[in-house]
Image (tube, rainbow, N blue to C red):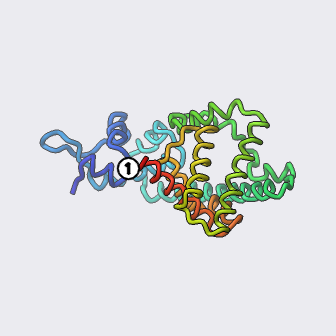
Amino acid sequence: MSHTVGEVAKLAHVTVRTLHHYDRMGLLSPSERSEAGYRRYSLTDLELLQQVLFYRELGFRLHEIKNLMRDGGIDRCEALLGQRDLLEMRVARLQAMVGLIDRTLVSLEGGIAMGKEEMFEVFGDFDPSQYEEEAKERWGEMDAYRESAKRTSGYTKDDWQRIKMEGEGHLKTMVTLLDQGVPPNDPRAMDVAEEARLALDRNFYPCSHEMHVGLGEMYVADPRFASYYDQHRPGLAQWFCDAIKANAERAATR
């Protein structure tokens, strides 16, 4: 059985435009065509697409992936095992980074200075600046990333202190409301959610209600964010997420 480009796009969670681009550059061309000339993808094509997406997730550029995939004698199992090793290394590194972030957050909350060695222990010989161009290539076209980078590049220490104090003020209000048993759809809860949204909009990037709802869901789904909020009060992350959703619904009816 073969699949249309639309079916493959939906299956692989990519866009039709992406598949067309892969075809044009010779990275992944469908092995079949319908009588009308439309692209049709076989099971082998899907297996190759999986390989491409694995390499993309690992940070390889498209032209590098093309060179890797050009070898017709590539053993799929061998390629998958190599990709698995690379992913395990990334997981270990990310876990170490998460641990450092958590310790840094704890030190900031408690006003305890971290040692210089401890601040950079997980980086080793890693120089973040050497990946600046890659970051621009991968995320630079995102409007939020571009706008945030533009704004924060000129921020001073006082600006960051002001932003920190704003965030702490919102957090304190949320804790108080939660302690008082105020439900997330109460106007007071929605108001603090709106203040938090406007702070993002003002300090970093245009933050619509829809985008804020997505962030709220991340506050619950991402253990780092969930633990940050819940350490102040158990259930605060979910309460804040629900308040954000209620605020977005309120805005939609106005």
* Crowd around label 1: few <14 · some 14–19 · many ≥20 (10 Å): many
Q: Give the amino acid type for the residue marked by disc 1 in the picture.
A: Leu
Residue assigned mark 1: 49
Left or right, 21 with reference to 212: left
Q: Residue at x 79, y 49 (%)?
A: 120
Please tell me which residue lies in front, 238 or 54. Answer: 238
The correct choice, above or below, for 64 with respect to 223 in the image is above
> Horizontal and vertical percent for residue 160?
74, 40
Q: Secondary structure at mark 1?
A: helix
Q: Quadrant of the N terminus?
A: bottom left
**Which one is in front, 23 or 238?**
238
Counting from the top left corner in percent of width and height, residue 169 is at 71, 51
Which residue shows up at 32% across the image and 52% down it?
Answer: 10
Identified at 46% across, 36% down, the residue is 63
Q: Residue 236 is drawn in which quadrant?
A: bottom right
Count of numbered circles on the image: 1
Instruction: Give the residue at x 57% y 54%.
Output: 86
